[in-house]
Amino acid sequence: MMRIELTVNGERHAVNAEPDQSLLSVLREALSLTGAKPGCGEGECGACTVRVGANAVRACTTPVSAVVGHAVTTIEGLEQDGHLHPLQQAFLDEGALQCGYCTPGMIMAAAVLLDQMPAPSVDDIVRGMQGNICRCGGYPRIIAAIRRAAHTTTGG
């Protein structure tokens, strides 16, 4: 074990962890941030997606040592001053969650997509969300939520 310093949701944290320990386990166990979900454990389902810098990453396959010096944002870090992020609100407004298990990863992947492409087409959204799986099949509502959030943030 070693002491590892991280910046998560704008706050500095020092945790005791193995350098190759997954970011997901550190977030959930050491920092009690349980929004990112364990799913496949292989980086294929997207339930554990978080933002590291400007990129969406799978926390289950990312060693915690790889994020040292980078800002990590989880679903818990999107809300600001008591106001939901436009994507969080859009997911609620569109009913884009059924069981909710995939929702944090979907929202985090969509946040990165909208940062990179503020006004995506439906095809852009489908491509950008590849690898984030909704076992309930809520894709039409998820796409509608992302479109709503894009419209809200761009005003277009």
Image (cartoon, grey):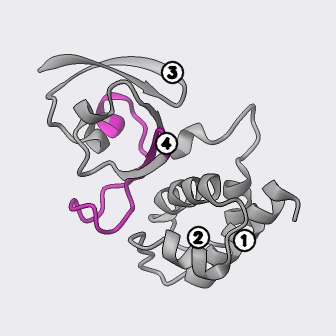
- Cα separation, mark 2 vs mark 1, equals 15 Å
Residue where numbered disc 3 is placed: 11
Q: Which residue is mark 2?
A: 97
Mark 4 and mark 1: Cα distance apart in space: 21 Å
Q: x, y (%) of residue 9?
A: 52, 31
Amino acid of disc 3: Glu
Q: Is residue 21 above or below residue 41?
A: above
Query: What kind of secondary structure does the magenta stretch mostly adopt?
Result: loop
Q: Nearer the viewer, residue 126 or 47?
A: 126
**Circles 2, 1 touching at the beta carbon (< 8 Å):** no
Q: CA distance from mark 3 to mark 4?
A: 12 Å
**Mark 3: secondary structure:** strand
Q: Are marks 3 and 4 in contact (CB under 8 Å)?
A: no
Mark 2 or mark 3, which is nearer to you? Answer: 3
Q: What segment is highlighted magenta in the picture?
A: 27-54
Mark 1 crowdedness (10 Å alpha carbons): few <14, some 14-19, many ≥20: many
User: Residue at the spot x=39%, y=33% of the render?
Assistant: 32
Marks 2 and 4 in Cβ contact (< 8 Å):
no
Q: Nearer the viewer, residue 19 or 70?
A: 70
Question: In this rendering, would 20 be left or right of 105?
Answer: left
Residue 35 visible, this orientation: no
The answer to whether any part of residue 38 appears in the image is yes
Residue tagged by mark 1?
A: 147
Q: Residue furthest front?
A: 116
Which labelled disc corresponds to residue 139?
Answer: none
Q: Residue at x 68, y 77 (%)?
A: 121
Q: Earlier in the sequence, mark 3 or mark 4?
A: 3
Question: Label 2: how many residues lie within 10 Å, few (<14), some (14-19) or many (20+)?
Answer: many
Which residue occupies the extreme right position in the image? 155
- Residue 1 coordinates in the image, percent (x, y): 11, 21
